Image (spheres, grey):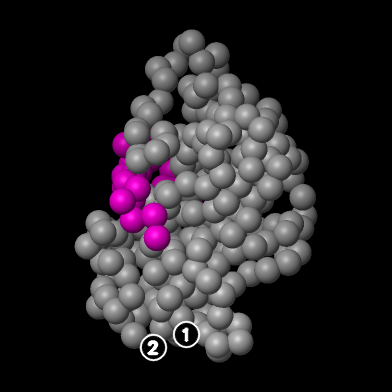
Amino acid sequence: MCCFTRPVESVSATKIFAREAGAGKQFLVYSMNYRVGEDLAMVLPLPVPVGSKEDAVQFIDLHDYSDLFQDLQAGFPEPQALRRPLSRSMPATAMAPLAVVQVGSFEASFVPQVKDFARLDARFRMPDGIWDKLPAYQKSGFAVFKLRKDASSVHPMAFAFPRADPSKLFFPTVHIHDGKVHDTAHFDHSLYCQVGSQYGKTAGWEETPQLASAFVKVAATKGIVDGNAHCYRKTIRGNQKNQDTWL
């Protein structure tokens, strides 16, 4: 799912869309429902090339298309009986603060390396030592979205990022909801993607019978969704190994 900088009361209905963006980059769109007791941040580790610059991630404002995932879901016919309504760092003072971008109703930042979290407000950093327990992310960059306690959901959060491995699509599904790293976690995910011919058909993924232009407002996605391609979906439910998903 995602990582939070403070404990959360609940997170559900996570939806993620991924597509190759060209030039070694990937589009990623993220949406969820949540309940929190204080302002905090959601952190998405990203497999970016080592040494990526602070402006390597391009945030995309989709606040005018809050129904993107409802439209994506509509592209997958369901049996009538199952159909549901759509609904260790230097002190921060020694380093320049990271840029903050206003993206619709929330603020976002790209953190190039673990040590750069010191350049964010303390509320928006992960608990001390958390990345030591996740050595696989020591070379990652991080998209950080600041969330308000008075909201229960957000419009789709979207961006394009450079990939360390351009041959794979990445879905950030690892969970950190209580400041601890657990081997397993409860999943409530719908993953969507569009893939090029180099990926082929993937077992376990559903394919839309129509092109995306038949059910998605393509222009409103600002280049993220290819209207001339089919979409694929995979659902992950229940207790699963706590890890990211790759295609």
Q: Residue at x 55, y 34 (%)?
A: 150
- Whole-Å distance between the Cαs marked 2 and 1? 8 Å
**Mainly helix, strand or loop, the magenta region?**
loop
Question: Do tag 2 and tag 1 residues touch (Cβ < 8 Å)?
Answer: yes
**Disc 1: CA contacts within 10 A as few (<14), some (14-19) or many (>=20):** few
Whether residue 178 appears in magenta in the rendering, the answer is no
Q: Secondary structure at mark 1?
A: loop
Q: Residue at x 28, y 66 (%)?
A: 217
Q: What is the x, y in percent for residue 8?
A: 68, 40
Discs 2/1, front: 1
Q: Is residue 164 visible?
A: no
Q: What is the x, y in percent for residue 154?
A: 47, 46
Q: Which mark is residue 28?
A: none
Q: Is residue 90 visible?
A: yes
User: Does 214 appear above or below 136?
Assistant: below
Q: Position of 18 compared to 23: left or right?
A: right
Residue assigned mark 1: 77
- Picture quarter containing residue 200? bottom left
- Picture quarter containing residue 52? top left
Q: Between residues 178 and 95, which one lies in front from this camera angle?
A: 178
Q: Residue at x 56, y 75 (%)?
A: 84
Residue assigned mark 2: 209
Q: Residue at x 71, y 42 (%)?
A: 9
Q: What is the x, y in percent for residue 48?
A: 43, 48
- Picture quarter containing residue 238? bottom right
Q: Between residues 236 and 67, which one lies in front from this camera angle?
A: 67
Q: Secondary structure at mark 2?
A: loop
User: Does 111 appear above or below 24?
Assistant: above
Q: Position of 87 compared to 225: left or right?
A: right
Q: Which residues are magenta?
A: 47-67
Q: Amino acid at mark 1?
A: Pro
